[in-house]
Amino acid sequence: MLFKIISIFLAFMGLLAILGKLRYPGQKRIEAMKCPRCGRFRIGKSSCDCQGKG
C-alpha cells in the first residue's frame, strides 16, 4: 500500500514538472521580463531603476 501511494505521488509530481515546462502562445519569455542593462526583473511596463525615472 505504501509503495502504491509513493508511486502515485511521484507520477503526479512528474506530470506537474512536464506541464510546468510547456510554453503557451503569447507567453512572455523570462529574458524579456528582465532589464537588459542590470538583469533585474521589471514589474509592469515602467523602466528599470538603473535607467532612471521616465
Image: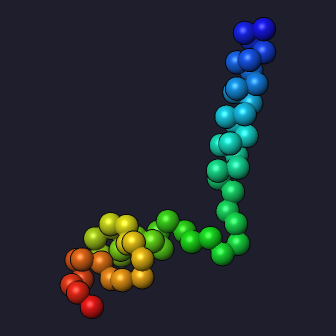
Query: In the rendered view, would you say 22 is above or below 11?
Result: below
Tell me: 29 left or right of 46.
Answer: right
Q: Residue at x 68, y 42 (%)?
A: 16
Toward the top, the furthest residue is 1
Q: Residue at x 74, y 11 (%)?
A: 3
Residue 50 percent location from the top left of the image: 22, 77
Query: In the rendered view, would you say 54 is above or below 50?
Result: below
Tell me: 38 left or right of 7.
Answer: left
Toward the bottom, the furthest residue is 54
Residue 18 percent location from the top left of the image: 70, 46
Residue 2 percent location from the top left of the image: 72, 9
Which is nearer the eye, 46 or 28? 46
Location of the N terminus by quadrant is top right
Q: Residue at x 27, y 91 (%)?
A: 54
Tell me: 40 left or right of 51.
Answer: right
Residue 32 percent location from the top left of the image: 48, 74
Q: Residue at x 33, y 67 (%)?
A: 39
